[in-house]
């Protein structure tokens, strides 16, 4: 923590100068979090002069890269007159934890007991009330807990993998989770047991979502994922993001360059659910052809890096070198999360660099920031 606050206006101006933020997007349309995220970009610095220890814009990028390699997160918050706080969270190593084993549909999940503030029977805790922004029905569930009314969420619906077998029609237990913000309450089917169990972290062979701390193995041989509640987003918040995005992006068209059929279709589903029109392409070469055919319709490009014929780097370079469409937002979405690939993509002019797998909220939030409105988007001319 430092006593000095970060000048958001200065960060915004530098982001516009470097092309990280479109000039037509006023600072009033950006959240505090969106503005602060610019400081993590490679080479970003507001220093007037370069010295031996500052001004090169590499320090913050290195910090985030190193923390990310440890499967951790780093966040920053600044408040006028209060200073700036940097928060680094690192995953738990192999250790003995007190875990609450829960039944959610056909699944067993484990939750660290130190993240649970309260446990209560569903029938005793739940009332029916109108909770703004929650759900699709007129009457929604909530609980009164320690004098506060908390909206109540099915835990199965907070897990992004969308497994329908985990959904429950008859919840029996309510858990109140401790988080950095306000507590949240969730519904589960049953509590199986509370045990001291070994947490086994996953390696980096495949990307692991941040809400999964690792797994534990029961005496029966069953492998149970360990869930970290602080990384779960309430459906009300996710739905608010999606609904807000749909309203402002209903007429937008996103060009997708992705050679994997499964990944391409997944992106199409996510974007279509949010109201986007999509133009799917199997590689960069097809993307260039589609860009010529639909030049006045496209709002942004989402591209993979490793593709046949024309790869993502070549596609990005071609778009950025054209005099009339160089400002078209391009988001790189790839499994290549190493610093070398990231630096190269950003140096070629990528507006953002996302790792696979990506959550719908992360992807839609990125597109909302880079292409905030249809009428504000500059026209794109055909490639020569």
Image (cartoon, rainbow, N blue to C red):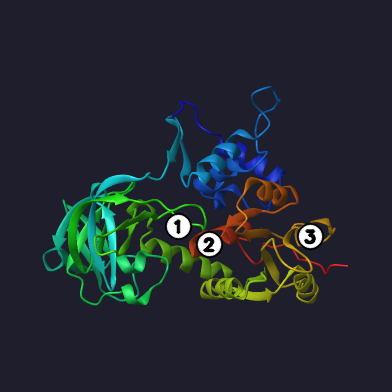
Q: Residues within 10 Å of mark 3 (few under 14, many from 20)?
A: some
Q: Are marks 1 and 2 in contact (CB under 8 Å)?
A: yes
Position of residue 230 measured from the top left corner of the image (x, y, whole percent): 35, 51
Q: Residues within 10 Å of mark 2 (few under 14, many from 20)?
A: some
Q: Are marks 3 and 2 in contact (CB under 8 Å)?
A: no
Find numbered disc 1 in the image and state the secondary structure of the residue it sits on.
Answer: loop
Residue corresponding to mark 1: 209
Position of residue 112 measured from the top left corner of the image (x, y, whole percent): 27, 51
Classify residue 74 as left or right of residue 193. right
Q: Among all residues in the image, which is located at the extreme top?
A: 52
| Disc assigned to residue 314 | 3
Which residue is found at the position 83% from the left and 61% from the top?
Answer: 324
Quick one: label 3 or label 1, which is nearer the N terminus? 1
Q: Among all residues in the image, which is located at the extreme left?
A: 124
Q: Are marks 3 and 1 in contact (CB under 8 Å)?
A: no
Q: Is residue 100 in view?
A: yes
In the rendered image, the vertical position of residue 315 relative to residue 117, given as above or below = below
| Disc assigned to residue 357 | 2
């Amino acid at each position: 923590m430092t006593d000095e606050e970060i000048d958001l206006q200065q960060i915004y101006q530098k982001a516009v100068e470097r092309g990280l933020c479109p000039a037509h997007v006023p600072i009033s349309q950006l959240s505090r979090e969106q503005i602060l995220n610019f400081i993590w970009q490679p080479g970003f610095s507001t220093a007037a002069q370069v010295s031996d220890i500052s001004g090169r814009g590499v320090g913050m990028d290195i910090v985030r890269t190193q923390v990310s390699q440890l499967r951790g997160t780093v966040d920053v918050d600044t408040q006028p007159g209060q200073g700036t706080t940097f928060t680094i969270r690192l995953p738990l190593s192999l250790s003995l934890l007190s875990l609450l084993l829960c039944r959610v549909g056909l699944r067993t999940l484990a939750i660290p007991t130190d993240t649970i503030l309260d446990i209560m029977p569903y029938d005793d805790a739940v009332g029916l009330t109108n909770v703004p922004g929650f759900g699709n029905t007129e009457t929604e569930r909530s609980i009164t807990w320690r004098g506060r009314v908390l909206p109540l969420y099915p835990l199965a619906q907070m897990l992004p993998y969308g497994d329908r077998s985990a959904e429950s029609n008859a919840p029996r237990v309510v858990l109140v989770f401790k988080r950095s913000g306000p507590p949240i309450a969730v519904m589960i089917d049953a509590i199986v047991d509370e045990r001291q169990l070994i947490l086994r972290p996953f390696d980096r062979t495949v990307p692991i979502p941040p809400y999964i701390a690792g797994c534990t193995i029961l005496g029966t041989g069953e492998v149970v994922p360990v869930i970290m509640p602080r990384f779960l987003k309430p459906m009300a918040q996710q739905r608010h993001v999606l609904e807000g995005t749909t309203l402002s992006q209903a007429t937008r068209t996103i060009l997708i360059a992705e050679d994997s059929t499964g990944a391409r279709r997944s992106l199409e589903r996510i974007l279509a659910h949010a109201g986007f029109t999509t133009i799917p392409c199997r590689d960069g070469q097809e993307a260039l052809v589609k860009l010529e055919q639909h030049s006045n319709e496209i709002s942004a490009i989402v591209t993979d890096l490793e593709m046949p014929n024309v790869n993502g780097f070549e596609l990005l370079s071609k778009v950025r070198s054209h005099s009339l469409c160089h400002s078209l937002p391009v988001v790189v979405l790839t499994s290549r999360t190493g610093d070398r690939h990231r630096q190269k993509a950003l140096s070629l002019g990528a507006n953002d660099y996302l790792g696979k797998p990506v959550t719908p909220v992360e992807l839609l939030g990125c597109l909302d920031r880079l292409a905030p409105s249809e009428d504000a988007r500059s026209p794109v001319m055909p490639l020569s």
